[in-house]
Image: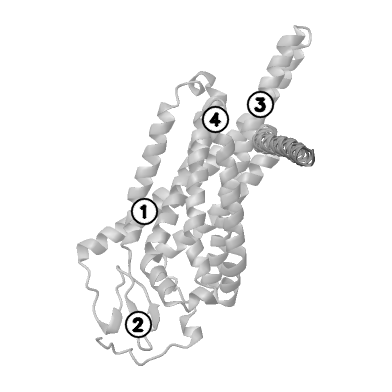
């Protein structure tokens, strides 16, 4: 086996730690896994309700895509938490898996975040169209499928550079029983590993630079600005419609009570849906806005990754993003009575179906048991008859022999 310069060098436990601070260690060990579990469970319940709705709408399709991308995001960030547990921190094979895949896991997570943010924009836009242009809202859902596919593939293309953005050599230590990896951005202008020069082609470095700026503008800054504008416009429209409804309600007081009740029901449904969408958009903006600002700062300034204050804020904004992924289920439950009713109905149906299966199984078991008991009784009865006949024949033979 070929020996490396680090073959006889053994790393201390603190040198193998992945977390940069004690706060990050505790967040990665305790908070992030809990949020991920709750977020995955909540988004799965969201998908269950959205996929079981009798009629699919464009908003439902965007919300389903959003929930699915959040589930993938929360699954793919789990290795970043697991690596901070001692059982995985010092495990050679898990560290090898983590160091070889962390760039790709990070890129996929950012892709999912990009899909989510544009799906939120699509939901907000669709709700505005539904309020302002009701006839357009009744159009076919084929357009929403095409928009979904366009969002997925476009954001995937814009974030693909992140699979190639860093160079992360893996080194083995301590007689090839320990493993460590350090990363450098391919557009690094300073000294390279082992005081070498950057080996990457200048054209490739320019491609990475342009990709970073495009990503920051299209995936981070521009969507947040659009969301703020759309959300303000959505809330303004909601307030305007409420005022219009009050005026219409006064005019309808002298009219048909049935027509008034129908309009009131329609108005309440539209308001409920609009409030739910507004809450989702507001929460998303508040939880992702700080992260967008941090991303912009990292891109346009030369803030060092060793700056403890910057790393602390970056960590906290990432925690906010994960919280945002977890909040959607709570927002649906708190703001939508229809969602709660639908979820409870599906849950009760599941229990009823399982109860019916158990009842059928019990009935079949009882039938089998009763049939077995009946057969046993019949067998005993026949055996008794045979025994009595044999006794009678024996007595007859004895009498004949005596006579």
In this rendering, the answer to whether 153 lies above or below 25 is above
**Which circle's residue, 1 or 2, is located before the other in the chain?**
1
> The C terminus is located in which quarter?
top right
Residue lying at 51% horizontally and 62% vertically, measured from the top left: 78
Answer with left or right where residue 231 lies relative to residue 402: left
Residue lying at 37% horizontally and 38% vertically, measured from the top left: 150
In this rendering, the answer to whether 163 lies above or below 356 is below
Q: Quadrant of residue 275?
A: top right
Tags 1 and 2 in contact by the CB under 8 Å rule?
Answer: no
Mark 1 burial class by Cα count in 10 Å: few <14, some 14-19, many 20+:
many
Measured Cα–Cα span from mark 3 to mark 2: 62 Å
In this rendering, the answer to whether 332 lies above or below 165 is above
Residue of label 2:
172
Q: Which mark is drawn over residue 269?
A: 3
**Which circle's residue, 1 or 3, is located before the other in the chain?**
1
Circle 1 SS class: helix
């Amino acid at each position: 086996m070929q020996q490396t310069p680090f073959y006889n060098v053994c790393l201390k436990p603190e040198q193998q730690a992945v977390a940069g601070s004690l706060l990050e260690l505790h967040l990665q060990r305790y908070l992030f896994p809990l949020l991920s579990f709750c977020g995955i469970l909540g988004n799965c319940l969201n998908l269950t309700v959205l996929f079981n709705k009798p009629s699919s709408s464009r908003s439902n399709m965007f919300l389903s895509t959003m929930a699915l991308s959040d589930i993938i995001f929360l699954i793919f960030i789990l290795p970043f938490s697991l690596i901070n547990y001692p059982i995985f921190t010092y495990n050679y094979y898990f560290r090898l898996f983590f160091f070889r895949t962390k760039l790709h896991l990070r890129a996929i997570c950012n892709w999912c975040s990009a899909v989510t943010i544009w799906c939120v924009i699509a939901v907000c836009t669709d709700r505005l169209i539904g309020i302002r242009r009701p006839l357009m809202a009744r159009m076919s859902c084929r357009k929403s499928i095409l928009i979904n596919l366009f969002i997925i593939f476009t954001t995937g293309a814009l974030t693909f550079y992140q699979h190639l953005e860093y160079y992360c050599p893996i080194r083995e230590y301590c007689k090839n029983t320990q493993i460590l990896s350090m990363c450098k951005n391919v557009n690094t202008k300073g000294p390279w590993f082992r005081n070498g020069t950057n080996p990457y082609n200048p054209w490739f470095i320019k491609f990475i630079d342009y990709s970073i700026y495009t990503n920051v503008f299209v995936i981070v800054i521009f969507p947040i600005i659009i969301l703020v504008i759309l959300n303000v416009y959505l809330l303004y429209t909601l307030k305007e419609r409420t005022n219009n409804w009050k005026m219409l309600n006064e005019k309808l007081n002298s009219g048909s009570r049935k027509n008034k009740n129908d309009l009131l029901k329609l108005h309440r449904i539209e308001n409920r849906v609009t409030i739910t969408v507004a809450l989702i958009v507001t929460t998303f903006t508040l939880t992702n806005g700080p992260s967008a600002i941090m991303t912009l700062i990292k891109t346009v300034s030369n803030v060092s990754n060793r700056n403890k204050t910057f790393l602390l804020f970056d960590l906290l904004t990432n925690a906010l993003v994960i919280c945002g992924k977890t909040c959607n289920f709570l927002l649906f439950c708190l703001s939508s009575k229809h969602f709660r009713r639908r979820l409870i109905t599906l849950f009760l149906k599941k229990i009823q179906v399982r109860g019916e299966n158990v009842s059928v199984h019990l009935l079949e078991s009882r039938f089998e048991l009763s049939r077995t008991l009946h057969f046993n009784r019949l067998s005993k009865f026949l055996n008794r008859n045979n025994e009595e006949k044999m006794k009678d024949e024996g007595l007859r033979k004895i009498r004949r022999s005596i006579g």
